[in-house]
Image: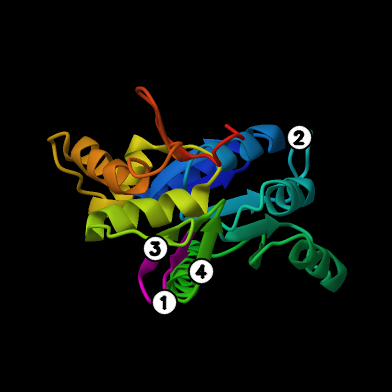
Amino acid sequence: MHVLIVEDNPDIIANLYGYLEPLGYTLDVARNGNAGVACATGFCHDAIVLDLSLPGMDGLEVCRTLRQEYRLATPILMLTARDTVHDKLTGFEVGADDYLVKPYSLPELDARLKALVRRSRNEHVHSVLIFGDLRLDAGTGQVTRGGQPLELTPTGYKILAALMRAAPTLMTRQAAEREVWGDSPPDSDALRTHIHTLRQVLDKPFPQPMLLTLPGTGYRLVVPGEA
């Protein structure tokens, strides 16, 4: 599981790394609100652990920005020392999915993160993803562009669904590999082959491409004419 931690307290960061990494988590850290927004929107994560009290942009504003400005659907677990009903309601109103009050139990944090990700992935199973004239119905598995059905390989389907969830932000090569192979990607350059195959179906029959490669970085979808 790939999790972004937005937290400025080095002791808490160290505790989270010490507990979660041995459980198989891959962790990124942002130490202030602005860095949290940049990291959350620049890379794909399964969940975000967001401290409420941050230097500069606080956690509420980070959450509000991610939900309202970037339409980011990544589950957000908010951490705070504030334990009033008003504070919790405010967190939920700006888009937090769950709430833990400090001091909290690390096993409970682990359990809540896993539950959030399970719910998020289950919602994706029944959702319809739309980006530009591209439509992916995760319930039926049907993908169309401009109303024209696209015949994707199972791996191409996984990659495209991840790209659509991230769109229009960048999906790194590492994130794309995790979507296909989990935490055990192959040593070969298999991803490039799958991207090539996906592009033949997604872009080749159409006047303008939607799948862009940022050399050495990753991939992202664009709406033709808006890139």
Residue 143's disc is 3
| Residue lying at 58% horizontally and 53% vertically, measured from the top left | 49
Which badge, 3 or 4, is on the more N-terminal residue?
4
Image location (x, y in percent) of residue 37: 65, 39
Q: In the rendered view, does 11 fall on the left or right side of 178? A: right
Q: Is residue 147 visible?
A: yes
Q: CA distance from mark 4 to mark 1?
A: 8 Å
| Residue lying at 70% horizontally and 54% vertically, measured from the top left | 67
Q: CA distance from mark 1 to mark 2?
A: 42 Å
Q: CA distance from mark 3 to mark 2?
A: 43 Å
Which region of the structure is painted magenta?
135-142
Do tag 4 and tag 1 residues touch (Cβ < 8 Å)?
Answer: yes
Front in this rendered view, residue 134 or 218: 134
Q: In the rendered view, does 183 fall on the left or right side of 117? A: left
SS at mark 2? Answer: loop
Image location (x, y in percent) of residue 74: 55, 56
Q: CA distance from mark 4 to mark 2?
A: 37 Å
SS at mark 1? Answer: loop
Which badge, 4 or 2, is on the more N-terminal residue?
2
Which badge, 3 or 2, is on the more N-terminal residue?
2
Residue 55's disc is 2
SS at mark 4? Answer: strand
* Amino acid marked by disc 2: Pro
Which badge, 1 or 2, is on the more N-terminal residue?
2
Residue 128's disc is 4
Q: Would you call the spot at circle 4 few (<14 residues within 10 Å), some (14-19), or many (20 or more)?
A: some
* Amino acid marked by disc 4: Val
* Amino acid marked by disc 3: Val
Residue 136 shown in magenta: yes
Looking at the image, residue 77 lies above or below residue 17: below
Q: In the rendered view, does 107 fall on the left or right side of 40? A: left
Q: Would you call the spot at circle 2 few (<14 residues within 10 Å), some (14-19), or many (20 or more)?
A: few
